[in-house]
Amino acid sequence: MLGLVAMVQAAPPPKKNGRSSQPAAAAVSAEDLQALKDAVAAQQQQIEAQQQQIEQLRQELGQKDANWRDAQQRATEAQGRLSAIESKNNQGDEDVANLKSDLADVKTTLTNTAVTTQDEQKRVSGVEGVLSRFRLNGDVRVRYENFLQSYDGCAAPNCNPRHRERLRVRAGFEGKLSEDFYGGAYFATGSLEDPVSTNQTLTGFFGRKPIGWDRGWVTYQPRSHKWLQLTGGKFAYTWARTPLTFDADLNPEGFSQKFSFDVPNRVLKNVTFTGLQLLLNESSTGADSFAAGGQVSTRLQLGNRVMLSPAVTLLNWRNTDAIAAAVANKTLAGNVMTNASTPDKKQFLSRFLYNDYILDAAVKTPWSRFPMRLLLDYVTNLNAASSRRHGYWVETAFGQTKEKGDIQFGYTWARIEQDAVISAFNESDLRAPTNVLQHRLNFQYQVARNTTLSYTSWFGRTLDRTLQNAQTPTGLGKSAQDPLLTRMQLDVIYKF
């Protein structure tokens, strides 16, 4: 287009009179026309190229505008998110502050809990320390027993067999109270008025059975002087004795002082002195009843198999009429009165001073599970009012009851004259406490380490039926000898 304008502008102007000073130019040639077309085409191409550039620029501007709008939207969204984040951060700061406060409270609580826990652990450790010094002991015995006695002239109900089932439960704990003090407490079944039996007969229409404290004591035995042992309370026997003088279920009350010295000798191994003050009855209106005395015992080793333990005891009983009165008034249950007494049975005719000699021999046999034991006891009442003052107890045993499968056989013979001992406190399973001749056979089998089966048969009769308070069956002729009373006992004993 621009080339065509230039060519028009280069043509000479016409004359005023319409005529040229020169002859007229020749007409435009085909070449010129073609050149003009080419120029126009080129110009058109340039215009199209420029339009394409403009369109490309327009597209680029549109894309940039779209990109800007998108960026602006993203910026807006980012600003929104930033605001949300800032809001969350602000809330988070509050949460963090709250969390820090809660954490501080938790730390305080944990600290207090830790201190409390430490205190409780100290107390628990203290309790565990105390409990670890004690051990629980006891046993449960279930017994079936019967009584059989027959004689001429015997009539019902005196000759009817008697059958009864009995239960004994004993349990308690004992151990160190401190380095120098030892003690314990036990309870047991049985009548509270009966000191010589912890058995409870299964009767009474399913009624509850009584139970009471059987022992409670403290022993002082200093570590620096192990030869010394001082005991007070209601305690197990601290001296050698047999059922001839005291029943196994009886636990004396009062005080005991023991001085035991080991001896470095091939034969004499130990010498022990024991002082006794046994309290029987405190009276607000009269003299108190008690027994006081002592025992000297030794332990002798004869070779590798024989151990002898001889003991001598003197025990003086004072104001014993309170015992007779308690039996007569039935405030003291257990053994019946068989000692010589006044007609009302409230006073003894004799006084009692026991002079008791015991020899306990343990023999190791070639069979380790079958040791032998021989126990001899002779007592005389030095203050008896008559010559019926002597008592004898001979007991033998072969075997043991320690491990599962162990067995033991035993035999006992006893002869106790009327006033040899106080009838209220010795063996309760005898035909009679005194004025009696007694035999006993027993067999034991160890079912388990803590469970024993036991069979015992007692065969006894009254020595002299003519004596006051002698135990005799109803309807027996005056000149007839007291028939044997047979008493069989079958026991299952569980220890823990």
Image (cartoon, grey):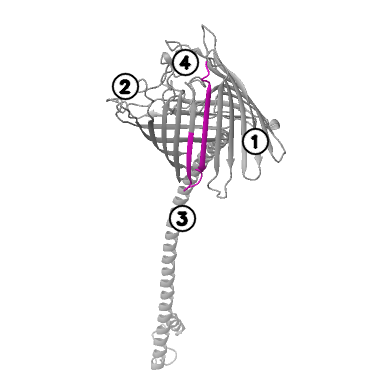
Where does residue 87 sit, x and y in percent of width and height? 47, 45
Of labels 3 and 1, the one closer to you: 1
Residue at left offset 71%, top offset 41% = 266
Amino acid of disc 4: Ala
Give the distance between the C-alpha atoms of the residues marked 4 and 2, in whole angstroms.
23 Å
Residue at left offset 43%, top offset 35% = 140
Q: Which mark is residue 75?
A: 3
**Quadrant (top left, top right, bottom left, bottom right) of the N terminus:** bottom left
Give the distance between the C-alpha atoms of the residues marked 4 and 1, in whole angstroms.
37 Å
- The front one of 60 and 218 is 218
> Pointer 1: what residue?
299
Give the distance between the C-alpha atoms of the residues marked 1 and 2, in whole angstroms.
50 Å
- The front one of 239 and 451 is 239
> Pointer 2: what residue?
475
Give the distance between the C-alpha atoms of the residues marked 2 and 3, in whole angstroms.
127 Å
Q: Name, please, the residue furthest toward the top.
A: 285
> Pointer 4: what residue?
340
Say whether residue 397 is magenta.
Answer: yes
Q: Name, please, the residue furthest toward the front.
A: 479
